[in-house]
Image (cartoon, rainbow, N blue to C red):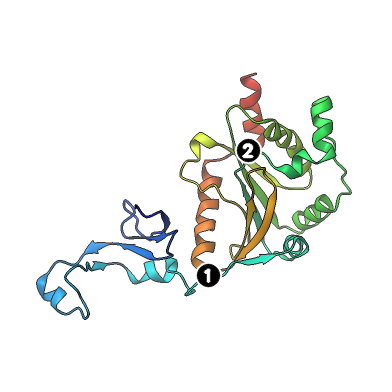
Amino acid sequence: MARQLRFIGTDSKVDGCPALHTDEGTGEVIVQGTPVTDPQDLAQLQHFGPGDAAVVVPRELLVNWGPKEMERVPEHVDRATFRRLFEAFEHTAWRLETRRGYASDRQDPDFQAFLAIGSSPCDPNDPWFVNIKAQTDAGKTVGRVRIADNPLTTEQRFLLDYTRHNAAVGEDIRYLWRADATDLPVEDFWIFDSRIVALLHFDDQDNMLDIELITEPAEVVRCAAVRDAAMHHAVPVEQFAAQIAATE
């Protein structure tokens, strides 16, 4: 049975070699690098068996991307702890949104209003908007990249309309077509100050099941790299909305 491998990272500037991958089933790390083939070099290796292979990788690859924990035990937090992260971050809070819809949106009265009249109201005194405005007024950055399907789902149309409320309190919302996001993971997460990741877990009905906090450096760096790639390819919401309007 083939392994289920997930790319961890690389420090290579050419074609991704050397690199690290992890086996999702066993947790083992797969090291990709230049093979050691010189017999004199191989003769110096201890405990080197007939079926073993040796590869050369830069030290920084292991320092930057190697797991720092023997076994990662997920740390789940409650909603109150999660909300406090939006008050305690120092510089940036950023989210990748990947789902076709969210149960919490469908349960929102603003969503029902959108279905009825085609426009979503909002309460500017909602604690979310009050806090985000306070953070952005203090010079902090709050942003998102949303992965969009073509055509948009009803929930995605609601969020696109609702984005004007987020923008009014200083959020930077950008969009990326799913067809252009094949290199990005399907995970939904927030990353705070490039040091804490809040990974959001959902069931098949789009209900958020739990929130996992991750501070393991290699995983945080991976999510930061995802953020950078998503921001590079995504377009501002105004440009995306104009694309949608042009096709309707």
Q: Whole-percent x and y of residue 40?
A: 10, 75
Amino acid type of disc 1?
Arg
Residue 55 placement, left or right of 63: left
126 shown above or below 138: above
Q: Whole-percent x and y of residue 35?
A: 21, 63
Residue 149 position by quadrant: top right
The local secondary structure at tag 2 comes to loop
Q: Whole-percent x and y of residue 86?
A: 74, 60
Amino acid type of disc 2?
Arg
Residue 156 position by quadrant: top right
- Sequence order check: which comes first, mark 2 or mark 1? 1
Residue furthest left as drawn: 39
Numbered mark located on residue 113 in the image: none
Quadrant of the drawing holding the C terminus: top right
Within 10 Å of disc 1 (Cα), the crowding (few <14, some 14-19, many 20+) is few
Return the residue at label 2. Answer: 100
Numbered mark located on residue 72 in the image: 1
Tell how many labels: 2
93 shown above or below 56: above
Q: Whole-percent x and y of residue 224?
A: 54, 57
112 shown above or below 14: above
* Front residue of 88 and 26: 26
Residue at 45 percent across and 69 percent down: it is: 67
Residue at 20 percent across and 78 percent down: it is: 45
Q: CA distance from mark 2 to mark 1?
A: 29 Å
Residue 185 placement, left or right of 15: right
* Front residue of 29 and 191: 29
Residue 145 placement, left or right of 137: left
Residue 60 placement, left or right of 190: left
Residue furthest front as drawn: 1
